[in-house]
Amino acid sequence: MPDERTSPSTTAAERAIADELRSSLQGEVIDRAHPAYDEARTVWNGLIDRRPAVVARCSGTADVLEAVRVAREHRPVVSIRGGGHQVAGSALCDDGLVIDLSRMKGVHVDPAARAARAQAGVTWGELDRETQLHALATPGGEISATGIAGLTLGGGFGFVMRTFGLSCDSVRSLEIVTADGVVRTVNREQEPDLYWAARGGGRGIGVVTSFEFGLHSLGPDVATVVMLHPYEHAEAVVRAWRDATSCAPETVTPELLLWSVPAAPGIPRELHRAKCVIIGSVYGGPPDDGALAALAPQRELGPVLLDLSATVPYVALQCANTWRFPDGERYFMKSHFMDELNDEAIRTLLDWDSRRPTPESLVVVRTLGGAVAHVGPDDSAFAHRSARFNVSIDAGWQDPAMDEAAIEWARSAWDAMKPFSSGGTYVNFAGLGEDASQLRGAVFGSHEERLAGIRAAYDPEGLFAPAARMP
């Protein structure tokens, strides 16, 4: 077995970084020759194939502080890994240092204060498991394997966001290690600029090591609508959904998916993977008669292929789609915020959906408004409070030979929908290889200049945000 400390492809500078980290971290330090190297550089999206020089698996905030000190001294390219679930793979960098928080899994719930403190390596499934012991939740994630850190820093869509807001809206405080090697407690009173930027401003402000979330009464069971409609009625169903959604109460968060019938137990085999329209809605309150009445319009939109509506445990809802987005498959996503979904936009969306390259690919239309819009437009870095919809075009596939075709479909569909967009895009659905300068304007809108100023104040040398990197 080769010596872990040396490798033909490892430079002297890289060895110096690894050696210094080994002398100061309690967590594991993994370089190119380490037997766990390939596992350490693997993230959810199989399209990502980056080769960092060193991965510092931090055991806690003290390790993070040491990793930042070493980065400041040696100046490698730096990336930060939480859950590793972001589609663009920003958790990894080539030939640099990955500050890996994925082993930092502490969660503490204070039911009396309706608050939870969670370290940055926690996933939504892990957080939900702890908070639901007390029938409490913070809104976040539609895939339980998603990390809380990246999703929250980018805003944070979820199944109950119209009732309780984005994930970032429930953040009470954060712990951040900034580029100067200072551990900062960040909230409305302490470091208010960092607090503003961390709620929707994406990455680049430092290493967030933990979050304190406010919790809301929800669960253990929730009422859901899941209606599968035959694809030949797609245009009529999408129009009916748009109209019904315009008057939905804030307790209902509707979404629409152009996808395929899941190959799941209980579903007739002859329907597996057939194209369909899926209507999904969740009621953000007790699953009582009021919930059924509020959700009823979402069940009356046209001919039905399957009705899978039910009252289910909230934790089951949160992980219901995780198996359909397995680790290691290939993903590319792009999105638009939209103020309306007119008939021409619907026809354009369906035209491009008809060209979907694989059954795993899909189009998702999520509704905003409600609690998302109650936060002032400049009260956090998230720049799209007034949008009514987010349209996400999600290519998914397994065969690397499909890379070009799948990515081209997503980009072309996004281009076709651009005339209907309000001009914004969602950073957590920003695909690999997008132009960083254009993306920042679309993601951050009128907040771009303020965010740049905050980043410059706390990281004047660009330790965490080189100009070429995704936001």
Image (spheres, helix red, strand yellow):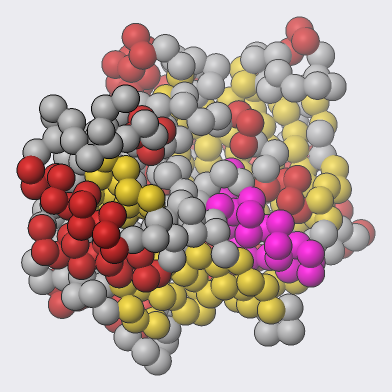
Q: Which residues are magenta?
A: 123-143
Q: Position of residue 393 (x, y in %)?
A: 43, 33
Q: Position of residue 124 (x, y in %)?
A: 59, 54
Q: Residue at x 65, y 14 (%)?
A: 274
Q: Nearer the viewer, residue 423 or 410?
A: 410
| Quarter occupied by the C terminus | bottom left
* Location of residue 64 (image quadrant): bottom left
Is residue 396 placed above or below 439 in the rendered structure? above
Q: Is residue 138 a member of the stretch shown in magenta? A: yes
Q: Position of residue 269 (x, y in %)?
A: 77, 10
Is residue 269 placed above or below 328 in the rendered structure? above
Q: Residue at x 82, y 31 (%)?
A: 307
Count every numbered label the image shows and give the total: 0
Q: Is residue 191 visible?
A: yes
Q: Nearer the viewer, residue 454 or 21?
A: 21
Q: Residue at x 35, y 26 (%)?
A: 47
| Quarter occupied by the N terminus | top left
- Judged left or right of residue 316, residue 99 is left
Q: Position of residue 86 (x, y in %)?
A: 40, 44
